[in-house]
């Protein structure tokens, strides 16, 4: 199953005393966040050109942290001209779950920007604190592209820290200008757009051009690049490709984090070199890595350079150790990973070449094979998955779990009972795999939460278990789906 790496971050906790004070104050003041549900959602949204909706769950800690910031932002934005409406929906409420499905809510909180009566939906990609929410939504509720009328306007916008796209035109009309504005509207939640009649206002690039031309400014590599094809699809591809660094730097500098997120969200295969970037002599390694990135530019593979100090979560995800750096990992979109530890500068190019030619065997993250496996529920790890699940010749009930999962802990004694029930049946195996510490082998196991249970019969039929989590229900499911031995079938006939 394909996996992707996320950027890990934590929201600051709110002190209990502050929460208590806020709750006391809220009872005396107006709530500016509009509460929506299945009964009023469509009617409310359809009447507004611009509204922001938070889909939340009452039990969600991140939602609780966001709540006072969201309310404060709603209060400030209610005074904006025109007012910006912030709303919320309890997506955990049964009657509202169809709304969560419609707006592709995969976790909490999820914020969506709805435009033109809900006809256009965009993901909210702004900050989670009040002032940041306000500034982000002021821009989002205004024009998709603002005119630059002076060099001062340009310097205020193009600050050398973010991607800025500027259209230079001889006049603000015609097909090229309309296509540019359509692009700005489509991508406004990802980039800042502006337009001008005079390229002399811009800080970099040829100042005599009259356009139409699109100039993309960026804080890395060549700092700006021009583009003259005004087909909307071509423009979109140009912006996406040009806004990615040749080599994305992952360190503790927060200004790099938006580019790290874009790297991991891209459809390309991902090459990741992890190293201690503060040691002497590292420049020879990083310069060679950059040469290789240049060689494979536009060939469906992106390159990231991760500093050891900032990459601990990535190390845990991939199941690798600090002692293996410098370390390169390449991950495909199908989740397969290819690894070379303790590499030298001259190892980089041959390794990437062998990967592209299919000569590198995949790497599997696996816990050590247990020295003893005598408990009723047998332990499976990635390195024993093939033998225990696919080649055991048994009917296998397999739980994918996470050690921290409360539902998994509740299920554990029930699975023990099921395993004891089948202890004398050599044709049934009850097993479990820690899905946070082992890669999942095979494309037939779609694990999106914990616990996830699958049953594989001896003939190879794979069926997810979605019934009640009781011994009786699980045993009945196994009996319904297992392949019987000839001896069992004969005994059944005699009965």
Image: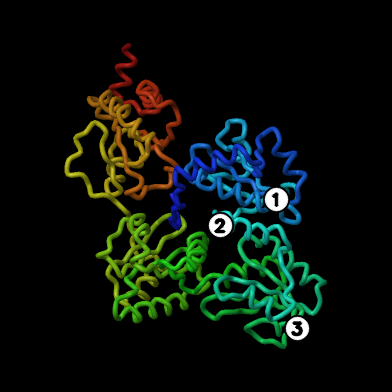
**313 shown above or below 165:** above
Do the residues bearing badges 3 and 1 touch, measured as CB atoms within 8 Å? no
Q: Earlier in the sequence, mark 3 or mark 2?
A: 2
Instruction: Identify the residue under disc 3.
Output: 210
Nearer to us of marks 3 and 1 is 1
**Marks 3/1: CA–CA distance:** 41 Å
Comparing 36 with 81, the one in front is: 81
Nearer to us of marks 1 and 2 is 1
Left or right for 13, reference 238: left
- Residue situated furthest left in the rendering: 371
Callout 3 environment at 10 Å: few (<14), some (14 to 19), or many (20+)? some
Instruction: Identify the residue under disc 2.
Output: 127
Residue 295 visible, this orientation? yes
Left or right for 376, reference 304: left
Figure label count? 3
Residue 115 visible, this orientation? no
SS type, badge 1: loop
Colour pattern of the rendering: rainbow
**Marks 1/2: CA–CA distance:** 18 Å
Instruction: Identify the residue under disc 1.
Output: 78
Do the residues bearing badges 3 and 2 touch, measured as CB atoms within 8 Å? no
At 43% from the left and 77% from the top, the residue drawn is: 290
At 35% from the left and 80% from the top, the residue drawn is: 283
Nearer to us of marks 3 and 2 is 2
Q: Earlier in the sequence, mark 3 or mark 1?
A: 1
Residue 223 location (% of width, % of height): 56, 79
**326 shown above or below 104:** below
Residue 442 location (% of width, % of height): 39, 47
Comparing 451 with 456, the one in front is: 451
């Amino acid at each position: 199953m394909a996996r992707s790496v996320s950027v890990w971050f934590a929201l600051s906790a709110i002190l209990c005393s502050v929460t208590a004070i806020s709750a006391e104050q809220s009872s005396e003041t107006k709530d500016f966040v509009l509460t929506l549900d299945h009964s009023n959602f469509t009617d409310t949204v359809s009447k507004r050109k611009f509204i922001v909706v938070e889909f939340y769950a009452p039990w969600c800690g991140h939602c609780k942290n966001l709540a006072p910031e969201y309310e404060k932002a709603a209060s400030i934005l209610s005074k904006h001209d025109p007012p910006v409406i912030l709303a919320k929906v309890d997506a955990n409420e049964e009657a509202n779950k169809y709304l969560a499905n419609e707006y592709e809510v995969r976790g909490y909180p999820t914020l969506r920007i709805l435009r033109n009566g809900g006809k256009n939906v965009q993901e909210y990609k702004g900050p989670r604190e009040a002032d940041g929410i306000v500034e982000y939504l002021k821009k989002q509720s205004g024009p998709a592209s603002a005119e630059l009328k002076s060099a001062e306007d340009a310097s205020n916008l193009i600050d050398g820290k973010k991607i800025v796209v500027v259209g230079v035109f001889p006049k603000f009309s015609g097909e090229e200008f309309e296509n540019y504005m359509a692009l700005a509207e489509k991508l406004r939640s990802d980039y800042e757009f502006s337009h001008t009649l005079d390229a002399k206002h811009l800080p970099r690039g040829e100042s005599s051009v009259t356009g139409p031309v699109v100039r993309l400014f960026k804080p890395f590599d060549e700092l700006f690049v021009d583009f003259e094809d005004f087909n909307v699809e071509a423009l979109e591809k140009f912006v996406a490709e040009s806004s990615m660094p040749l080599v994305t730097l992952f360190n503790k500098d927060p200004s790099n984090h938006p580019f790290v997120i874009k790297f991991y969200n891209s459809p390309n295969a991902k090459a990741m070199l992890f190293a201690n970037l503060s040691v002497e002599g590292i420049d020879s390694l990083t310069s060679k890595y950059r040469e290789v990135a240049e060689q494979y530019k536009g060939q469906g593979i992106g390159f990231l350079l991760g500093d050891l100090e900032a990459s601990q979560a990535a190390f845990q995800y991939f199941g690798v150790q600090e002692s293996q750096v410098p370390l390169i990992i390449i991950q495909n979109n199908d989740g397969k990973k290819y690894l070379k530890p303790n590499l030298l500068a001259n190892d980089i190019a041959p390794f990437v070449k062998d990967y592209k030619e299919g000569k590198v065997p995949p790497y599997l993250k696996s816990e050590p094979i247990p020295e003893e496996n005598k408990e009723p529920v047998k332990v499976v790890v990635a390195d024993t998955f093939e033998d225990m699940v696919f080649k055991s010749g048994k009917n296998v009930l397999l739980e994918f779990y996470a050690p921290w999962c409360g539902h998994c802990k509740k299920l554990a004694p029930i699975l023990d009972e099921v395993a004891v029930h089948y202890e004398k049946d050599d044709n049934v195996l009850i097993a479990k795999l820690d899905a946070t510490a082992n890669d999942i082998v095979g494309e037939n196991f779609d694990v999106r939460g914990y616990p996830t249970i699958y049953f594989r019969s001896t003939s190879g039929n794979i069926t997810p278990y979605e019934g009640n989590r009781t011994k009786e229900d699980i045993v009945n499911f196994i009996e319904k789906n297992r392949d019987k031995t000839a001896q069992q079938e004969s005994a059944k006939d005699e009965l």
